[in-house]
Each structure stands twice: as C-alpha cells, then as structure tokens.
C-alpha cells in the first residue's frame, strides 16, 4: 500500500491507510445518503467503481446514481463503473467459496484490475448471506481473512449490512472483522475489531463446537 495516497472522504470523516469498512444502515435511503458522495467523488477522481447489489436493486441503483449527478451509462462504457448482482458475484454454482472470493477480490485490487485506474472503490451489499446459517458463518470468516488482502492495497471497500436482517450476535461478529465501521451515518474506528489470526482461531473453535479452546490453523 502506498502511504502517499490522499485520504478519501466518507461518512463525515476520512479514510487513511486502513480502508475495509462495515456499514450498518436502517434503510436504503440512509445507505444512499451516506455513500453517494463517496461514490461520486471516486468517479470524479478517476477511481474504479465496483458495486455489488441485490438482484432486484439494479434499476433502482442506476436511478440513485443518476439522481446524484452521475452518468452511469458513460462510466460503464468507459469501464470505470462495474455493477454486479450479489448472487452472481458471491454464489457461483449456488455456493459461497471463500478461496475463490479471495482470488476475485485480489483481481479487483489496485495494481491488478484492468484499466488505468489509481484504485478501486468497492461497495458490496451483503443481504444475500441471510437465511443460511452455514453460509453466513463462512461469510464472517471470509470477512476476517480478506483483511490480509486489503491491508496491502489502497482500495476502499465498504460492506453494507441492513441491521433489521441480522441478529445481534451476528452483528458483533461482523464488527469484529472490520477495522472501521459506519453506524448512525458516521465513520468510526472500530473498537471491536480483532486481527484475523486471533479472530479466526476463536471463530473456528466456536464453529467446531470447541468453545474458546485453542486450535491449530490449517
């Protein structure tokens, strides 16, 4: 990661060197109010924009971008804006594969993504993980593991979660996998963040039914 990269404005504050953020929202309106300035600023700076949205959200997403003064058609034609459906991005063949997704995000990272873009600004809606307990556990583990990728790049990555769809204990685990959090519309350092090595030891033990007993990483 380049330490000379200018800060990025987001949710009333600035992103420095650490740029993996979980964002909790109560509604679509709140989500777009907070994120549209960040998206528009990135496009005006020439950054790559990758948006992962719900299957039924694509048209509304394009409308929201246009309402903020963004020309999504032109940005897409130029290769600067890429909009993916979350089920297609995360659930190829109907299943979530952590290792495949790590490779996918590595390919989207600055220095690896095609095109002459200084960095990527990635916004992922995470609703697709709801409804399958095993899948959600894999997603939480993945969110921890992916920090090792984003710590090596300048890209800004925002994972959005709507609070009404997740249990309280799940929200705490999600918090623990992100060094930064947006809550109440404001970006904050996350005091719950746990470094991946420590979190994964504990979480894998919990998933295996061993409670807090230590286990060896594979």
Image (cartoon, rainbow, N blue to C red):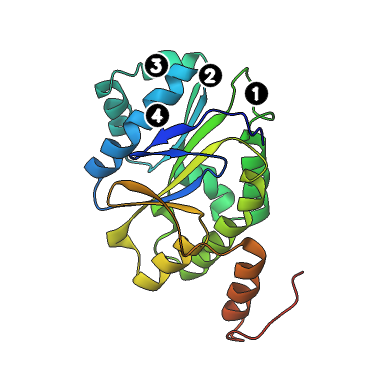
Q: Rounded to the nearest whole Å, what is the CA distance between mark 2 and mark 3?
A: 10 Å
Q: How far apart are labels 4 and 2 at the CA level? A: 15 Å
Residue neighbourhood size for the residue with mark 3, other residues' Cα within 10 Å, grouped as few (<14), some (14–19), many (≥20)? few
The residue under the point 50% across, 55% down is 178
Q: Please name the residue that numbered disc 4 is placed on.
A: 39
Q: Position of residue 202 (x, y in %)?
A: 61, 76
Residue at image mark 2: 79
Q: Are marks 1 and 2 in contact (CB under 8 Å)?
A: yes
Secondary structure state at the residue bearing disc 2: loop
Q: Residue 201, which numbered label?
A: none
Of the two numbered discs 3 and 4 in the rendering, the one whose residue sits closer to the viewer: 4
Tell which circle, 3 or 1, labels the residue nearer the N-terminal end. 3
Q: CA distance from mark 4 to mark 1?
A: 19 Å
Residue 73: give its label: 3
Q: Is residue 20 above or below residue 207?
A: above
For marks 1 and 2, the one nearer the N-term is 2
Q: Work out whether residue 187 can be spotted.
A: yes
Whether residue 58 appears in this view of the structure is no
Classify mark 4: helix, strand or loop. Answer: helix
Q: Which residue lies under the disc numbered 1?
A: 114
- Mark 4 touches mark 1? (CB < 8 Å): no
Quadrant of the rendered structure where residue 210 is?
bottom right
Cβ atoms under marks 3 and 1 closer than 8 Å: no
State the separation of the CA atoms marked 3 and 1: 19 Å
Q: Position of residue 79 (x, y in %)?
A: 53, 19
Question: Marks 1 and 2, how far apart in space?
Answer: 9 Å
Q: Quadrant of the C terminus?
A: bottom right
Q: Secondary structure at mark 1?
A: loop
């Amino acid at each position: 990661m380049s330490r000379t990269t200018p800060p990025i404005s987001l949710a009333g504050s600035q992103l420095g060197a650490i740029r993996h953020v979980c964002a909790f929202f109560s509604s679509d309106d709140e989500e777009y109010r907070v994120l549209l300035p960040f998206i528009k600023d990135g496009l005006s700076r020439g950054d790559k924009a990758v948006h992962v949205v719900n299957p039924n959200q694509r048209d509304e997403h394009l409308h929201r971008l246009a309402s903020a003064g963004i020309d999504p058609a032109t940005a897409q034609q130029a290769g600067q804006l890429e909009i993916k459906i979350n089920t297609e991005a995360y659930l190829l063949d109907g299943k979530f594969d952590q290792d495949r997704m790590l490779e996918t995000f590595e390919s989207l990272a600055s220095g690896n993504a095609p095109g002459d873009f200084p960095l990527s600004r990635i916004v992922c809606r995470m609703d697709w993980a709801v409804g399958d307990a095993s899948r959600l556990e894999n997603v939480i583990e993945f969110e921890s593991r992916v920090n090792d990728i984003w710590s090596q790049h300048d890209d800004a990555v925002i994972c959005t979660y709507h609070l009404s769809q997740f249990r309280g204990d799940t929200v705490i685990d999600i918090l623990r996998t992100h060094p930064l959090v947006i809550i109440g519309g404001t970006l904050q350092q996350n005091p719950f963040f746990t470094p991946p090595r420590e979190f994964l030891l504990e979480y894998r033990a919990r998933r295996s039914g061993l409670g807090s007993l230590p286990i060896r990483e594979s």
